[in-house]
Amino acid sequence: MGTRESTRSRLLDATDELVFAGGDTTTPVDRILERAGVSPATLYRAYGSKEALVAAALDRRHREWLEVWDAAVARADTDRERLLALFDALEEFQGRATGARWCAFLGAAAGYADPPPALAEAVRQETETLRRRLLALAEPVAGPRAAALVDALALIYSGQLAMRLRPGSPGVPAGVARELAALVVEHPERLGA
């Protein structure tokens, strides 16, 4: 017998809240089960393991993130603004009720020295999607320097997310990251080979 979609959603919501929004990749499975109001048997029937549940929650979060990013790109009027829309989307996504203390994917990657295959795949897919989309947006702006520009923008993006973890600091506002990214976008020729 399969698991109801509402039960799966409760498990994903509990994982999102405790592991991602709470920023605790070591959250015990018992806390997730308690928050979702389901039994261990239900979790294992639906997902097979805690790691597979976390990977499914990452996949859902990734889809939601891409929707926000796509909407930000669609609102932009120029190639340059479409490229910088990454930072507009980041600010919007982090401001949502389901916003996280930092990036759920960075958290998952940092939480395991040797991540289980399902988690490693979820992180790999998010990283590849980020780079592929940025490259497509950077090519009209930077031409042959697009790959170097993607490296710089990914660094700024990841750094902005990581700054949220510094104790006693709210992190760097996304607007600052966007301004820095705009400077880099204006001068891609200054980036290393």
Image (spheres, rainbow, N blue to C red):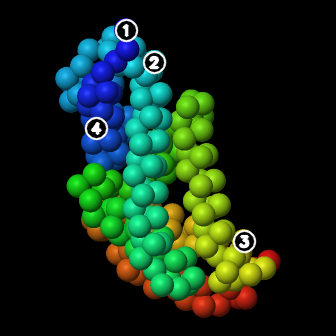
Q: Amino acid at mark 2?
A: Gly
Residue located beneath label 1 in the image = 1
Q: Residue at x 61, y 46 (%)?
A: 124
* Label 3 sits on residue: 147
Residue type indicated by callout 4: Asp
Whether residue 74 can be seen here = yes
Instruction: Name which of mark 4 and mark 2 comes first in the sequence.
Output: 4
Q: Give how far apart the Cα atoms at labels 2 and 1 are.
A: 14 Å
**Residue that carries the numbered disc 2 in the rendered image:** 48
Number of marks drawn? 4
Q: Quadrant of residue 38?
A: top left
Could you classify mark 3 by the number of other residues whose Cα lies within 10 Å: few (under 14), some (14-19), or many (20 or more)?
many
Q: Which quadrant of the rendered structure holds the N terminus?
A: top left
Residue at 41%, 42% (x, y): give it: 60
48 above or below 16?
Answer: above
- Cα separation between marks 3 and 1: 48 Å
Tell me which numbered mark, 1 or 4, is placed earlier along the sequence: 1
* SS type, badge 3: helix
Q: CA distance from mark 1 to mark 4?
A: 22 Å
Amino acid type at mark 1: Met
